[in-house]
Image: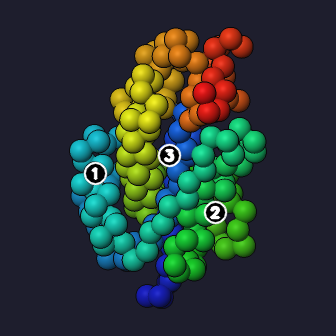
Amino acid sequence: MNESYRVAGVDEAGRGCLAGPVVAAAVILPKTWDLPGMTDSKQLSAKRREVLAGAIKEQALYWALGVVWPPVIDTINILQSTKRAMLTAIERLGHVPDMVYIDGNQPVPTSLPQKSIVGGDSSEPCIAAASIVAKTFRDRVMVSLERRYPGYGFARHKGYGTRAHLEALRRLGPSRMHRLTFKGVVQREEHLCLPGI
């Protein structure tokens, strides 16, 4: 493999959440780059993720994000939304990679050579880096959404279906940031909050 051969790692955050966007990151790391503690973002504390994300964004050759919001998720489904976010991140890299490593088993609709790797966020540094960048960005989005949509606890659970989140949904009904096609979001018709209300 020659020195100019570059691999982009791609991963997503928020696919299984009931609220908020699905976010994907694409990262191209230097060949000699090594940072202790790099692994799947879900295995790291929030503080450690933030430290690593800063180092990744500072030292990566290229990195980019793709974001798809709940109205689109409800329209085209979460699988297609995840692929769209990943493709957007790849296209925004500012450099065309020679190969794309994608976490999971679903290919992305791109003409670039690609390899889907189950558990790639634990085995491939470039995918682990993408996982960390995507997760930290999405967490910040959810904290900001807490201020716009108080009462749901977005800053704590980040949109995942925790007991507290489900209780808030029963009490308040879904917000505009909830994925209405996801099971458990719309409890009863009388609880549905229409956009703008």
Task: Answer yes or no: is residue 16 visible.
Answer: no
In the image, residue 73 above or below residue 1: above
**Residue 57 in the image, given as x and y percentages of width and height:** 34, 66
Please give the name of the residue rendered at 60% of the width and 50% of the height, measured from the top-left corner: 68
Q: Quadrant of the C terminus?
A: top right
Q: Secondary structure at mark 1?
A: helix
Tell me the CA gap for discs 1 and 3.
15 Å
The front one of 47 and 103 is 47
Between 50 and 154, which is closer to the camera in this rendering?
154
**Disc 3 packing (10 Å; few <14; some 14–19; many ≥20):** many
Q: Amino acid at mark 1?
A: Glu
Which residue appears at 53% of the width and 80% of the height?
A: 95
Q: Which residue is mark 1?
A: 50
Q: Amino acid at mark 2?
A: Leu
Q: Earlier in the sequence, mark 2 or mark 3?
A: 3
Which residue lies most toward the front here?
A: 197
Residue under the point 56% across and 35% down:
177
Which residue matches tag 2? Answer: 87
Mark 2 or mark 1: whose residue is earlier in sequence: 1
Tag 2: Cα neighbours inside 10 Å, few (<14), some, or many (≥20)? many
For residue 131, the mark is: none
Dot 3 lies on which element? Answer: strand
Q: Tell me the residue that label 3 is attached to.
A: 13
Q: Nearer the viewer, residue 63 or 102?
A: 63
Please tell me which of labels 1 and 3 falls first in the chain: 3
Q: Is residue 175 left or right of residue 155?
A: right
Q: Give the percent coordinates (x, y) of residue 52.
A: 28, 56
Numbered label tally: 3
Residue at (48, 66) in percent of width and height: 64
Q: Amino acid at mark 3?
A: Ala
Under circle 2, the secondary element is helix
